[in-house]
Image (cartoon, rainbow, N blue to C red):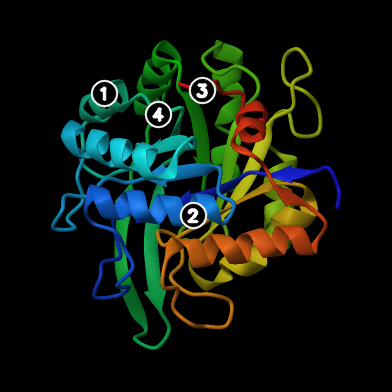
Amino acid sequence: MLDDPVVITCAISGVIANRSQCPAIPYTPQEYGEEARRAVEEGASMIHIHARKPDGTPSYEVEDFVAITQAIREQAGDVIINYSTGTVGVPVEKRIEYLKAGLPEVAALNMGSMNYAKYSKSRKDFVFKMVFSNPFDEIIQLLEAMNELGIRPEHECFDIGHVGSLPPLIDMGILKAPLHVDCVMGVVGGIPPSARNLAAMVENIPGVAHGVGGGERSHWAVIGISRDQWLLLAAALTLGGSIRAGLEDNLYLPSGEMAKSNGELIAKARQMAQDVGRRPASVEEARALLGVTRR
């Protein structure tokens, strides 16, 4: 097996799907902790969190993020905690509040505005559609808060144009090496999900082909939405990137069977990494690749 570790992230729940669609989606802090433990046991080194209230509704409250984080640390042990900051209609100040309270090692940061939708061919209509607004002023405000708090930004890019938003921020001195960039594919309104499009996105990430400032290389991963996820994970593993799986992104195993837990999805992602000669990164290796230190 190659000495080429893969950071495997588990996105535990998201905010869109609910238990009527998948019974395994966690709602309570205890359930988040249990799902995180299953994911870590199968090879995940980072847990991505969208908070929910115990009744399953999305939450952006400090107490819910803190309770979920504590439950994950108690049950899953040493793992990198990653908070989402992506939302519609929630003020930046409120998002910064839960970053300050929970102090995750990593926080996801959406790098551009877009139409964000899901389309149904059978219905000949959109399942949902919205404008996902992420203006530069908000991006900069969140970045400055993350820098102050010692949180590594995870730049979620839904299109090549979002990748193109990174160099100006580097030039301004707000971003510093190494970058950690996620290529998000499979959302209608963003880049279509294909291996060729993934390669094009990666080529444009500052510091992938050449170091950014001091020669440090940027780290990148793919986030594949819905059933295209498995094709995209295979492409990322071949191209040398890291991967994310979990019930936020996709509810189904490659067989078409619905996953009974996040652990099942992470186990499949780990197997794919091993099948191409790579291996899951330990938590300490993941921290080194991402440029973060343990809290």
Left or right: residue 284 compared with residue 237: left
Residue farthest toward the right in the current orientation of the protein = 2
- Mark 3 or mark 1, whichever is nearer to me: 3
How far across and down, in percent of the image, does residue 217 sit?
74, 27
Spatial separation of the CA atoms under disc 4 and disc 3: 10 Å
> Which residue bears the numbered disc 3?
294
Q: Residue at x 77, y 23 (%)?
A: 211
The answer to whether residue 112 is visible is: yes
Q: Which residue occupies the foreground of this view, 258 or 200?
A: 258
How far across and down, in percent of the image, does residue 246 sit?
47, 59
Does 289 sit above or below residue 14? Answer: above
Does 90 sit above or below residue 198? Answer: above
The answer to whether residue 193 is visible is: no
Q: Amino acid at mark 3?
A: Arg
Spatial separation of the CA atoms under disc 2 and disc 1: 24 Å
- Mark 2 or mark 1, whichever is nearer to me: 2
Secondary element at image label 4: loop
> Dot 3 surroundings within 10 Å: few (below 14), some, or many (20 or more)?
few
Q: Which residue occupies the foreground of this view, 212 or 197?
A: 212
> Dot 1 surroundings within 10 Å: few (below 14), some, or many (20 or more)?
few
Q: Residue at x 24, y 75 (%)?
A: 20
> Which residue bears the numbered disc 4?
104
Of callouts 2 and 3, the N-terminal one: 2
Secondary element at image label 2: helix
Spatial separation of the CA atoms under disc 2 and disc 3: 19 Å
Q: Residue at x 53, y 53 (%)?
A: 41
Q: Is there a contact, CB below 8 Å, between mark 2 and mark 4?
A: no
Q: Is there a contact, CB below 8 Å, between mark 4 and mark 3?
A: no
Residue 39: mark? 2
> Which residue bears the numbered disc 1?
101
